[in-house]
Each structure stands twice: as structure tokens, then as C-alpha cells.
Amino acid sequence: MLAVVAFDATASLASLAIGFNYEYSAFGSLLLYCVFGYWASGVRTILFASIVGALMGLTDASLGWAVSWILGPGRWEPGLLTLPTWALIALQITAVAAICDLLGGVARRYMPRGKRTQA
């Protein structure tokens, strides 16, 4: 979850320094979710990977967004972001993150592996 917040902060600062559209950093978040899902299923199970994804998504939609908001690129116009709107967005991000981690976990479990040689 720290990786998500660090990524959001880095993407926000890069957006301000370089001037790219901050919304493109969503692709980096998706990649991050898949990578951690791949890792998590190696540590435990595919279900564990999906749970890790849900927690990462919730962190991204709350603390990660707050960091981006403070730094600048994640801000919404005043009055547009209501609690119900945020809750719906947080639910969507959490679900997408869980699915991405699940896909990363499935990739780890079911990808063919090279033959191991004995030394």
C-alpha cells in the first residue's frame, strides 16, 4: 500500500514538473496492481492476491488521492466531489485493483514455467 501512495506522489510531482496529464498515471497504477498480484499469489494464494488488490485500491482511492490532491493534480473543482461521488469512485477503484491483482495472481499460477535442471 505504501507503493501506491509513493507512486501517486511521484506521478503528481512528475505531472507538475513535466506537464503531462496526471490522468495517464492510472495506467501505472494498473500495472502496479498486476505486479503486486503476481507477487502476492506467489506468497499465498490467488484469493490473497485479490485481497491485496482490494486493499491497494482502497488505499489509492483514499490516501493516494489525498496526496495527489495536496500536491495539486488530483484536485476536483469545489463542490463537485461529494461523499457519495467519492464512495462510488472508491468502490470502482477498489474493484478494478482487486481484478488486476487477481489477473496478476492467475498469471503467476498458470503461466508455463521453464523446465528446471538439476545441478
Image (spheres, grey):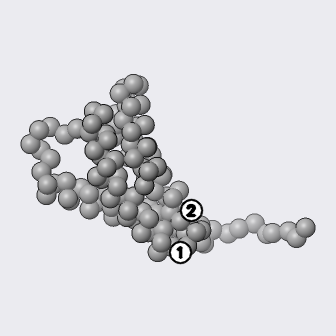
* Picture residue at 60% right of the left edge, 72% below the top: 110
Q: Is residue 105 above or below residue 58?
A: below
Task: Please tell me whether mark 1 sits on a helix, a strand or a loop.
Answer: loop
Tell me if 5 is positioned left or right of 111 in this view: left
Q: Which residue is mark 2?
A: 39
Please state the horizontal and vertical placement of residue 39, each as a whole percent of the image.
Answer: 56, 62
Q: Which mark is residue 45?
A: 1
* Picture residue at 44% right of the left edge, 69% below the top: 50
Please state the horizontal and vertical placement of residue 55, each as a whole percent of the image.
Answer: 38, 62
Which quarter of the figure is the N terminus placed in?
Answer: bottom left
Amino acid type shown at disc 1: Thr
Q: Is residue 26 visible?
A: yes
Please state the horizontal and vertical placement of residue 56, each as a whole percent of the image.
Answer: 40, 58
* Picture residue at 55% right of the left edge, 62% below the top: 38
Q: Nearer the viewer, residue 41 or 3?
A: 3
Q: Nearer the viewer, residue 24 or 1?
A: 1
Alpha-carbon neighbours of circle 1 within 10 Å: few (<14), some, or many (≥20)? some
Q: Nearer the viewer, residue 61 or 103?
A: 61
Please state the horizontal and vertical placement of residue 102, each as a whole percent of the image.
Answer: 46, 68
Q: Do tag 2 and tag 1 residues touch (Cβ < 8 Å)?
A: no
Tell me how many marks there are: 2
